[in-house]
Image (cartoon, helix red, strand yellow):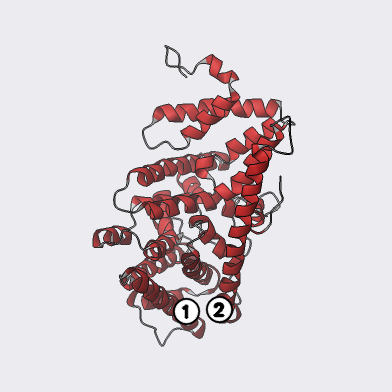
Amino acid sequence: MKDKKGNFNVLVEEDREGLRELFEASQVRIEGEEVLEEAEVFSGGHLKEWANLHRHTSEARSIQLTLDQPCHKSLARVTSPNFLDSFSANTTTIDQGWTWMTLLNKLVTMDFKIVQSIHQREIVLVSKWWKELGLAEELKFARDQPLKWYLWTVASLPDPSLSEERIELTKPISLVYIIDDIFDVYGTLDELTLFTDAVNNWEIKEQLPDYLKICFKALDDITNKISYVVYRKHGWNPIDSLRKSWGKLCNAFLLEAEWFGCGKLPNEEEYLKNAIVSSGVHVVLVHMFFLLGEGISMEAVNLLDNIPGLVSSTAAILRLWDDLGSAKDENQNGHDGSYVECYMKRHKECSMGEAREQVIRMIKNEWERLNKECFSSKHFPMCFRKGCLNAARMVPVMYDYDDHHRLPGLQNYINSLLSHQTI
């Protein structure tokens, strides 16, 4: 695709399908692959220009979808309906009643109905568990979104056979959100310090207010239950690692509460180092690793306890997306800072737009690191690496707010799971 001078061939500019494939290929690059970085700029620029000039055509819409949702960084069940719609619109055949597209659509519909029935059953079980847990009644200030929390597990573990794993993983995810709300919008600094100490020592404190005792009991019950499930299925008791991960999370939450409670804004490096932990990704992925049950060894567990690159890059992608400014949670009134804010404090000459561009570059860099870890890591099994990759793919769906402070991507994802229109 390059000429003798090392520039991309002019003829390639006219090959839109080739440009799309080049753009898709550039998304799997790792650190140091400058040619693929050039390929993204070249192909993405020409595709965007063509799509803008022909914006009312179905092909332009299809190209824009490629630019917005490249396959490697997107969830298959989100992008596949768009692909089928686009392909169908651009396909002409002699016999529209019996084509391979018709057969493919029938297969898609069949697969959807099977998977849909599994998810509907899981949603019933998750909703029942959440209601019986009683935290929504006891902690009325906290978020009450079991479906949203469950969707993280559907994205990360899409294999229909992993039903029990999805249900169990929803439980620690729910507590990440609940404890985040406690630290961010409700608890006093003294109460939060006591709670953090209780979690680190894994011992309830009499001085804790009742609402924190209730939260700690739920945390203890869920941790014990998941430890039992893992031990029963895989012969390994993960309770020490699970407890450590919750301690790290509460330490990170407490540090943020101390920073912003006294009006201190850390520099961007300090902020991101802590935010990688406070994102909750490490806690969730530790639980995922043990629930999947493959490749459990002392070496892997020690690595996981210390937040390896596979986990930290996934967490950084989530935190940086969340911090882009459009991702302020619709149900929170607290303030826990953002990378953009910290960056602009240090770089006073920098505008908001420039700070956001910096964050976008950092997200791309973290994707390169995540790709490298997923493709080359020998310490963790493929199922866990795929789970991390899928969690990163879910981030834009969860955090890309529109101008009306809604989440159209999330709504489309829910529709793709729970409803279906044939092509």
Q: In the image, residue 173 lies at what x, y percent?
A: 49, 66
Which numbered dot is residue 48? Answer: none
Badge 1 is on which residue? 218
- Label of residue 135 in the image: 2
Q: Looking at the image, which is closer to me, 394 or 77?
A: 77
Query: Tag 2's secondary structure?
Result: helix
Q: Amino acid at mark 2?
A: Leu
* Point 63% across, 53% down: residue: 110
Q: Residue at x 58, y 55 (%)?
A: 398
Distance in Å between CA atoms under marks 2 and 1: 8 Å
- Percent x, y of residue 249: 41, 66
Q: Is residue 348 shown above or below 234?
A: above
Q: Secondary structure at mark 1?
A: helix
Q: Residue at (44%, 83%) from the top-left corner?
A: 208
Q: Position of residue 172 (x, y in %)?
A: 47, 69
**If you read the primary sequence from the N terminus, does the residue marked by circle 2 or circle 1 appear first?**
2
Q: Quadrant of residue 74?
A: top right
Estimate how packed mark 2 is, as few (under 14), some (14 to 19) or many (20 or more) residues with alpha carbons within 10 Å.
some
Image x and y of residue 146, in percent:
58, 68
Type of the residue with mark 1? Ala
5 or 325, which is in the foreground? Answer: 5
Q: Are marks 2 and 1 in contact (CB under 8 Å)?
A: yes
Q: Is residue 323 visible?
A: no
Question: Is residue 113 in view?
Answer: yes
Q: Is residue 29 depicted above or below 401 in this figure?
A: above
Give the left or right position of residue 149, taking residue 376 as reference. Answer: right
**398 or 1, nearer to the observer:** 1
